[in-house]
Image (cartoon, rainbow, N blue to C red):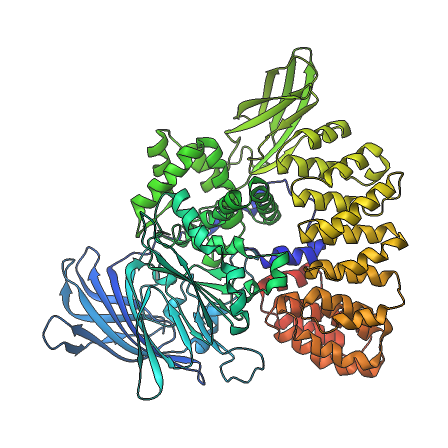
């Protein structure tokens, strides 16, 4: 999912170095790792019956599990079951074939506390099945540290921060404002921390789960809720049945005080109606449709674009506290972290459609067809990531989709500065390393390139064939290639070798020369892997080249296939612009200089987002605003149909003082009040405030009533900059808001006055802000303390320490740590910060501390 690190990078820009285009073979670490095969399956797990009740006090679960097996192929006289950290009470063979089921105790070994080795009373062949009943206690918090200690793992995409499988939130009910919840997270192999299973992605089973909970709680699990039974002791037992097989890592249970919001997907000619539902904290009940409401449309869209119906029996999404990752595609029971929970005003600024589409798409790529080993994880994650692109392309148009793809490219290139691996990595050292910007972002980019190589029709027909061939089964990367080859009739080994099995990306340099009648392009591939065995030497890839002459575009389709290549095109006159890789399909970087005139031409003539954004990026060099033609183009771009371009043009005009300043000023005022996109309105206010026209005070004041929190927070900061007479009164109007950016603006104002009576306001406001949005506020708090007396500073230390150590969000912890950095004059603070750094468990935050050189 959208990575924490990406957002932290915005806060910590010193982490991004300029060098992004060099392949370094030294980054290919998994060459040397141990080979990770798919798990050998001696017995096939067919079905799991589970009775589970929960002990909040001990944070344990008491379970009775019955597992149905049959030998996979070879006869077996024993079976190995994953069961991590259990107390085992009994293990027995169940014979349900008789009128009265019989139970035979079995002998077993459980020496390492991780694998239960059960001896069968005789040898079974593959035509026979048998059932084993295990009664046990799951103790997720007592698992040995090695099982879940956060190592310094890769810092992007879908990484999890823990792997104990079963989580109790606010178990003793003593944390004010925090709901009591129980939820699970199975991927990769953590579900065997709460039920015995064969915990590997190449196993598939059906389920019958009975969850016994206090009757005030709601439950969620995979499949359908078939009954709810009240028990004499005041508890209730919910029975969830999933009759379609899936991999054990996709099993899930959730318990707590959730509001249940029912949506639906009406029946059509080719599909029955489907329950679509959302489980959110009660306070967000009225926002559930605002948050998740596009889900039914997404299901319909993916059915159509993948060509395969949604096969599962419902689709629920649950939001939980303190989740260990972004979200998880448990079959029919997706879990999201609390960041998706937004109120109506927050939803004006942003929504979670990307992650919602991502988890839903996994119900085809991941849940229906599962990667057979973690080495093949891109078969899950690349598709789910690319599905975000497909949804945006469909629902919001190509510009929005391309914006997403551009950000994926940046994320991959940023990871590629220190890590370059094949997408499919049989020699990974730690399976968690697979959840990175390769499997997700680069994977999505490679699928897009594949789509361009084979064409849309063949691409989607191949996906359909792949899904249908392997439905309810597993796949490795060769299976994907075979589907594409069967559909297209082409050999595609070369493509899969370059992009799935070799590390790196293309680094292309283009130089152009015009002689009458002919355009010559020198195209050089300069990835430094050239010539190193195991790497791609020269990519073989078709690219588009657009050439404009007299305002008219001609498009050429050219295959790159050599490290040094001369491309000659018949062009009648000196072209105004040559756009190499015109649809930006290459996974990698292209260096091709442009004159200012060419970039100006590119903005007005190229029709894609990527070409427009590239031209503005080139034009916005330092000193750009001294060129009237650049300013004119930026003014034109204020009317661009796509908001991101408008926002970029607006921000590019910051501090402008030239001749067109009153035109700019006027236009920005209009955008500030009327642009449909809040990000553009906010940017317009921010740029206006750099123009220092006192008359704009009215505009800022007016924007304080905007529906968007982002706009209001910028308006507030901008308004206060002018030191208006009513500043105190205006600030007071916003001091009780619940939004992080607005409160940060208030805090900034209060910080400067450093009034000791504001101390309580600061400490009480922190709790009102969503943990992920506390960073800025905490910095302002630090500023307030810096200007305050030593007595107040000392008083704040325990508060800051508690946040820096214990806040659920790394953003908040980082903010409090930074605030402490402003108090280094106090005795002991430097040691305290060192202790906080050492105790930090989040790998990404640890990496940031390291990068800061502290
Ligand atoms: Zn995913």
Q: Residue at x 70, y 68 (%)?
A: 815
Q: Is residue 645 left or right of residue 368?
A: right
In percent of width and height, residue 698 lies at: 84, 57
Q: Is residue 368 visible?
A: yes
In percent of width and height, residue 535 lies at: 50, 37
Question: Looking at the image, which is closer to me, 576 or 151?
Answer: 576
Residue reaching furthest to the bottom: 233
In percent of width and height, residue 779 lies at: 75, 68
In percent of width and height, residue 420 lies at: 55, 46
Q: Residue at x 83, y 46 (%)?
A: 665
User: Quarter-wise, where is residue 88 in the image?
Assistant: bottom left
Q: Is residue 121 left or right of residue 329?
A: left
Q: Is residue 93 left or right of residue 615?
A: left
User: Quarter-wise, where is residue 615 in the image?
Assistant: top right
Question: Looking at the image, which is closer to me, 135 or 289?
Answer: 289
Residue reaching furthest to the left: 99
Q: How many marks?
A: 0
Q: Residue at x 77, y 44 (%)?
A: 652
Q: Is residue 251 left or right of residue 21?
A: left
User: Quarter-wise, where is residue 208 in the image?
Assistant: bottom left
Q: Is residue 502 visible?
A: no
Q: Residue at x 85, y 54 (%)?
A: 696
Residue 371, placed above or below residue 214: above
**What is the quadrant of the C terminus in the image?**
bottom right
């Amino acid at each position: 999912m959208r990575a924490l690190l990406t957002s932290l990078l915005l806060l910590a820009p010193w982490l991004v170095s300029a060098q992004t285009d060099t392949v370094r073979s030294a980054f290919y670490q998994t060459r040397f790792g141990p080979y990770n095969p798919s798990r050998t399956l001696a017995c096939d797990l067919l079905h799991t019956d589970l009775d589970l009740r929960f002990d909040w006090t001990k944070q344990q679960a008491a379970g009775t599990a019955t597992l149905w097996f049959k030998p996979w192929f070879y006869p077996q006289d024993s079976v190995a079951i994953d069961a991590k950290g259990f107390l085992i009470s009994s293990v027995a063979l169940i014979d349900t074939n008789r009128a009265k089921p019989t139970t035979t105790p079995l002998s077993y070994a459980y020496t390492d506390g991780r694998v239960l080795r059960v001896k069968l009373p005789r040898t079974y062949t593959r035509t026979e099945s048998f059932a084993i009943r295990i009664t046990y206690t799951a103790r997720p918090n007592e698992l040995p540290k090695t099982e879940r200690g956060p190592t310094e793992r890769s810092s992007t995409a879908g990484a999890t921060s823990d792997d104990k499988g079963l989580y109790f939130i606010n178990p003793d009910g003593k944390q004010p404002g925090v709901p009591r919840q129980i939820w699970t997270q199975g991927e990769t192999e953590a579900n065997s921390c709460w039920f015995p299973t064969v915990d590997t992605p190449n196993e598939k089973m059906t389920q019958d789960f009975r969850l016994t909970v206090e009757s005030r709680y709601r439950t969620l699990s995979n499949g359908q809720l078939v009954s709810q039974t009240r028990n004499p002791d005041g508890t209730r037992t919910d029975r969830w049945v999933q009759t379609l097989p899936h991999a054990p890592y996709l099993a899930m249970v959730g318990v707590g005080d959730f509001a249940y919001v029912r949506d639906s997907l009406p029946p059509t000619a080719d599909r029955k109606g489907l329950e679509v539902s959302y489980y959110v904290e009660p306070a967000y009940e009225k926002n559930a449709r605002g948050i998740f409401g596009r889900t039914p449309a997404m299901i319909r869209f993916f059915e159509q674009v993948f060509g395969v119906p949604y096969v599962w029996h419902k689709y629920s999404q649950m939001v939980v506290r303190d989740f260990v990752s972004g979200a998880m595609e448990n079959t029919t029971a997706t879990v999201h972290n609390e960041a998706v929970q937004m109120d109506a005003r927050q939803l004006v600024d942003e929504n979670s459609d990307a992650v919602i589409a991502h988890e839903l798409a996994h119900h085809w790529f991941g849940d229906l067809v599962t990667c057979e080993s973690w080495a093949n994880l891109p078969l899950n994650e690349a598709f789910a990531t690319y599905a975000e692109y497909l949804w945006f392309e469909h629902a919001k148009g190509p510009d929005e989709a391309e914006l997403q793809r551009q950000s994926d490219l940046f994320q991959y290139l940023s990871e590629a500065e220190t890590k370059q691996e094949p997408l499919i990595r049989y020699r990974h050292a730690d399976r968690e390393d697979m959840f990175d910007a390769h499997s997700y972002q680069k994977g999505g980019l490679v699928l897009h390139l594949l789509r361009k190589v084979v064409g849309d029709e063949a691409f989607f027909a191949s996906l359909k064939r792949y899904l249908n061939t392997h439905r309810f089964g597993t796949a490795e990367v060769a299976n994907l290639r075979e589907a594409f080859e069967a559909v297209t009739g082409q050999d595609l080994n070369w493509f899969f070798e370059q992009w799935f099995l070799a590390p790196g990306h293309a680094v292309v340099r283009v130089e152009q020369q015009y002689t009458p009648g002919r355009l010559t392009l020198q195209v050089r591939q300069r990835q430094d892997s050239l010539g190193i065995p195991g790497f791609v030497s020269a990519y073989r890839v078709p690219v588009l080249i657009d050439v404009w002459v007299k305002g008219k575009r001609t498009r050429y389709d050219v295959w790159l296939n050599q490290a040094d290549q001369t491309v000659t095109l018949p062009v009648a006159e000196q072209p105004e612009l040559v756009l190499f890789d015109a649809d930006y399909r290459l996974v990698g970087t292209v260096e091709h200089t442009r004159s200012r005139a060419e970039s100006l031409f590119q903005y007005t003539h190229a029709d894609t987002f990527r070409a427009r954004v590239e031209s503005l990026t080139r034009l916005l060099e330092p000193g750009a605003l001294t060129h009237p033609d650049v300013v004119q183009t930026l003014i034109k771009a204020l009317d661009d149909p796509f908001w991101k371009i408008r926002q970029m043009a607006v921000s590019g005009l910051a501090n402008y003082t030239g001749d067109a300043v009153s035109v700019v000023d006027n236009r920005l005022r209009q955008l500030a009040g009327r642009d449909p996109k809040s990000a553009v309105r906010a940017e317009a206010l921010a740029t206006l405030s750099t123009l220092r026209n006192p008359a704009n005070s009215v505009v800022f004041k007016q924007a304080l009533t905007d529906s968007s929190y982002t706009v209001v927070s910028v308006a507030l900061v901008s308004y206060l900059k002018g030191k208006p007479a009513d500043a105190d009164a205006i600030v007071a109007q916003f001091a009780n808001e619940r939004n992080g950016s607005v409160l940060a603006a208030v805090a900034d104002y209060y910080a400067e006055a450093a009034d000791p009576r504001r101390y309580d306001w600061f400490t009480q406001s922190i709790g009102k802000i969503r943990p992920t949005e506390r960073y800025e506020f905490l910095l302002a708090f630090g500023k307030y303390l810096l200007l305050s007396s030593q007595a107040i500073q000392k008083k704040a230390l325990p508060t800051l320490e508690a946040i820096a150590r214990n806040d659920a969000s790394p953003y908040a912890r980082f903010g409090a740590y930074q605030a402490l950095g402003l108090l280094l004059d106090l005795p002991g603070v430097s040691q305290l910060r060192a202790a906080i750094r050492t105790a930090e468990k989040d790998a990404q935050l640890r990496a940031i501390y390291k990068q800061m050189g502290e």
